[in-house]
Amino acid sequence: MAWDTAKTKQLLLDAAVQEFAEHGPQGARVDRVAARAGANKERIYQYFGNKERLFAAVLEAELAKVAAAVPLSADQGADLGEYAGRVFDYHCAHPHFLRLLAWEGLQDGQVPVAAEDERTTHYADKVAALARAQASGAIGDDLDPAYLSYAVFALTTWWFSAPQIVRMLMAGVADDSTRSRREALVHMVRRLAG
Amino acid sequence: MAWDTAKTKQLLLDAAVQEFAEHGPQGARVDRVAARAGANKERIYQYFGNKERLFAAVLEAELAKVAAAVPLSADQGADLGEYAGRVFDYHCAHPHFLRLLAWEGLQDGQVPVAAEDERTTHYADKVAALARAQASGAIGDDLDPAYLSYAVFALTTWWFSAPQIVRMLMAGVADDSTRSRREALVHMVRRLAG
DNA sequence: CAAATGTCCAACTCTCTGGTTGGAATCTTG
DNA sequence: CAAGATTCCAACCAGAGAGTTGGACATTTG
């Protein structure tokens, strides 16, 4: 049988995504990643160098996915609430992504953020799209567009970042389904966008 | 000299707060906690049992502090924006607390949340205060008070939960000082409260 | 003061795990 | 098909770090 190194590498990366999302960069076990992928531990060091760089590779791969999955163009920015809803939907479907991001945020200040320049321009694009929507009058312009997008991301993702707090906070809510969370989110973002 | 075990225990707890905030439950090193406190590692096992229970003790201690520091009574709830501002100020002054909470949120689903019942009623009180403020007409009532407090916490804390993303998001903002963040936050919460 | 109890610490154990290695199997090339 | 390169893997290594222990010292109690 012919070698299929690309496939092995992909299997390892997928396994690593799961493992890192569950346990974080510290708790993740290289052996477990290899076992999940049905490959040998040594392959990881051959392909990715070490655990730290494997984590970086995982982050970059997932960032690319999410960037492609939920674009924000100028016209879509017109209904910011619905955009937030779509981001929310994405995270519901791929709950591991925000865990990876959360772990990245908690990393030691020493380790550089993965693909920082690329991501910075990516966010700049989003902010610029909001600025255009404001200029066109589609949404209110009393907030700096960067702060407005801050609000969108904060409101959209905090369900996933602090699930234990959300659970305690929502203990008394009659209907706290995913659907009603989404509705509340869309409602709140629309109001913020004015 | 008389033994001062209470002091040693407190020193260990303080050191553990720092260590866990910086490195998380996985990355924290028991030896380092002992060294920071100028005590012996064995004291930790004597007083707290093991690393996991030390982490729980750390969380409970800090939760008690924060609950006492930023109360939300019905009348204070009238200006929800200013309440959010005060919570923001607290976290600026004690940045380690939200890191602890973030790590708690990422824990394995297996380990029980520290002081869950107590915290649940604590949050229920806050939500009830908001509900009263809504009933009195001080703030708008088109949002479930639980979702409203979700928004307050999400907007107030995401700066700290995802600092790397905030940094990239704010790269193009002329004046992104703590002050302007606080102003934007108060403004956004006021608008949400209607 | 002497026994009992509690506090402290240096040194130890033992498991876990990131990373390596030597060699076997597989593929490519001439 | 032979030589060289590449992929694969089982076993190994070394260090780290959670948790323990044995005994020295301090304090209380009778």
Image (tube, coloured by chain):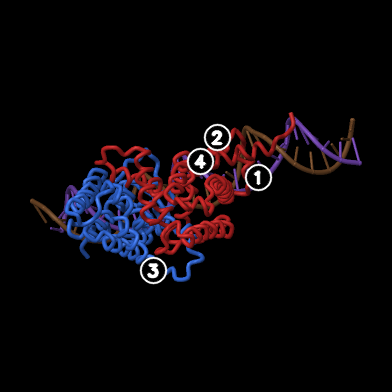
Chain colours: A blue, B red, C brown, D purple
Q: CA distance from mark 1 to mark 4?
A: 17 Å
Q: CA distance from mark 1 to mark 2?
A: 16 Å
Query: Which amino acid, by three-letter code, is at mark 4?
Result: Glu
The label shown at residue A180 is 3
What subunit carries mark 4? B
Q: In the picture, which quadrant includes the C terminus of chain A?
A: bottom left
* Labels 1 and 3 touching (C-beta < 8 A): no
- Pointer 2: what residue? B36
What subunit carries mark 3? A
Are discs 4 and 3 both within one chain? no
The label shown at residue B47 is 1
Seen from the viewer's position, the closer of residues A54 and B183 is B183
* Labels 2 and 4 touching (C-beta < 8 A): yes
Query: Which amino acid, by three-letter code, is at mark 3?
Result: Ser
Q: Vertical placement of A136 versus B144: above or below?
A: above
Are discs 1 and 3 both within one chain? no
Q: Position of residue B138 (x, y in %)?
A: 45, 56
The label shown at residue B19 is 4
Q: CA distance from mark 1 to mark 3?
A: 45 Å
Which circle's residue, 2 or 4, is located before the other in the chain?
A: 4
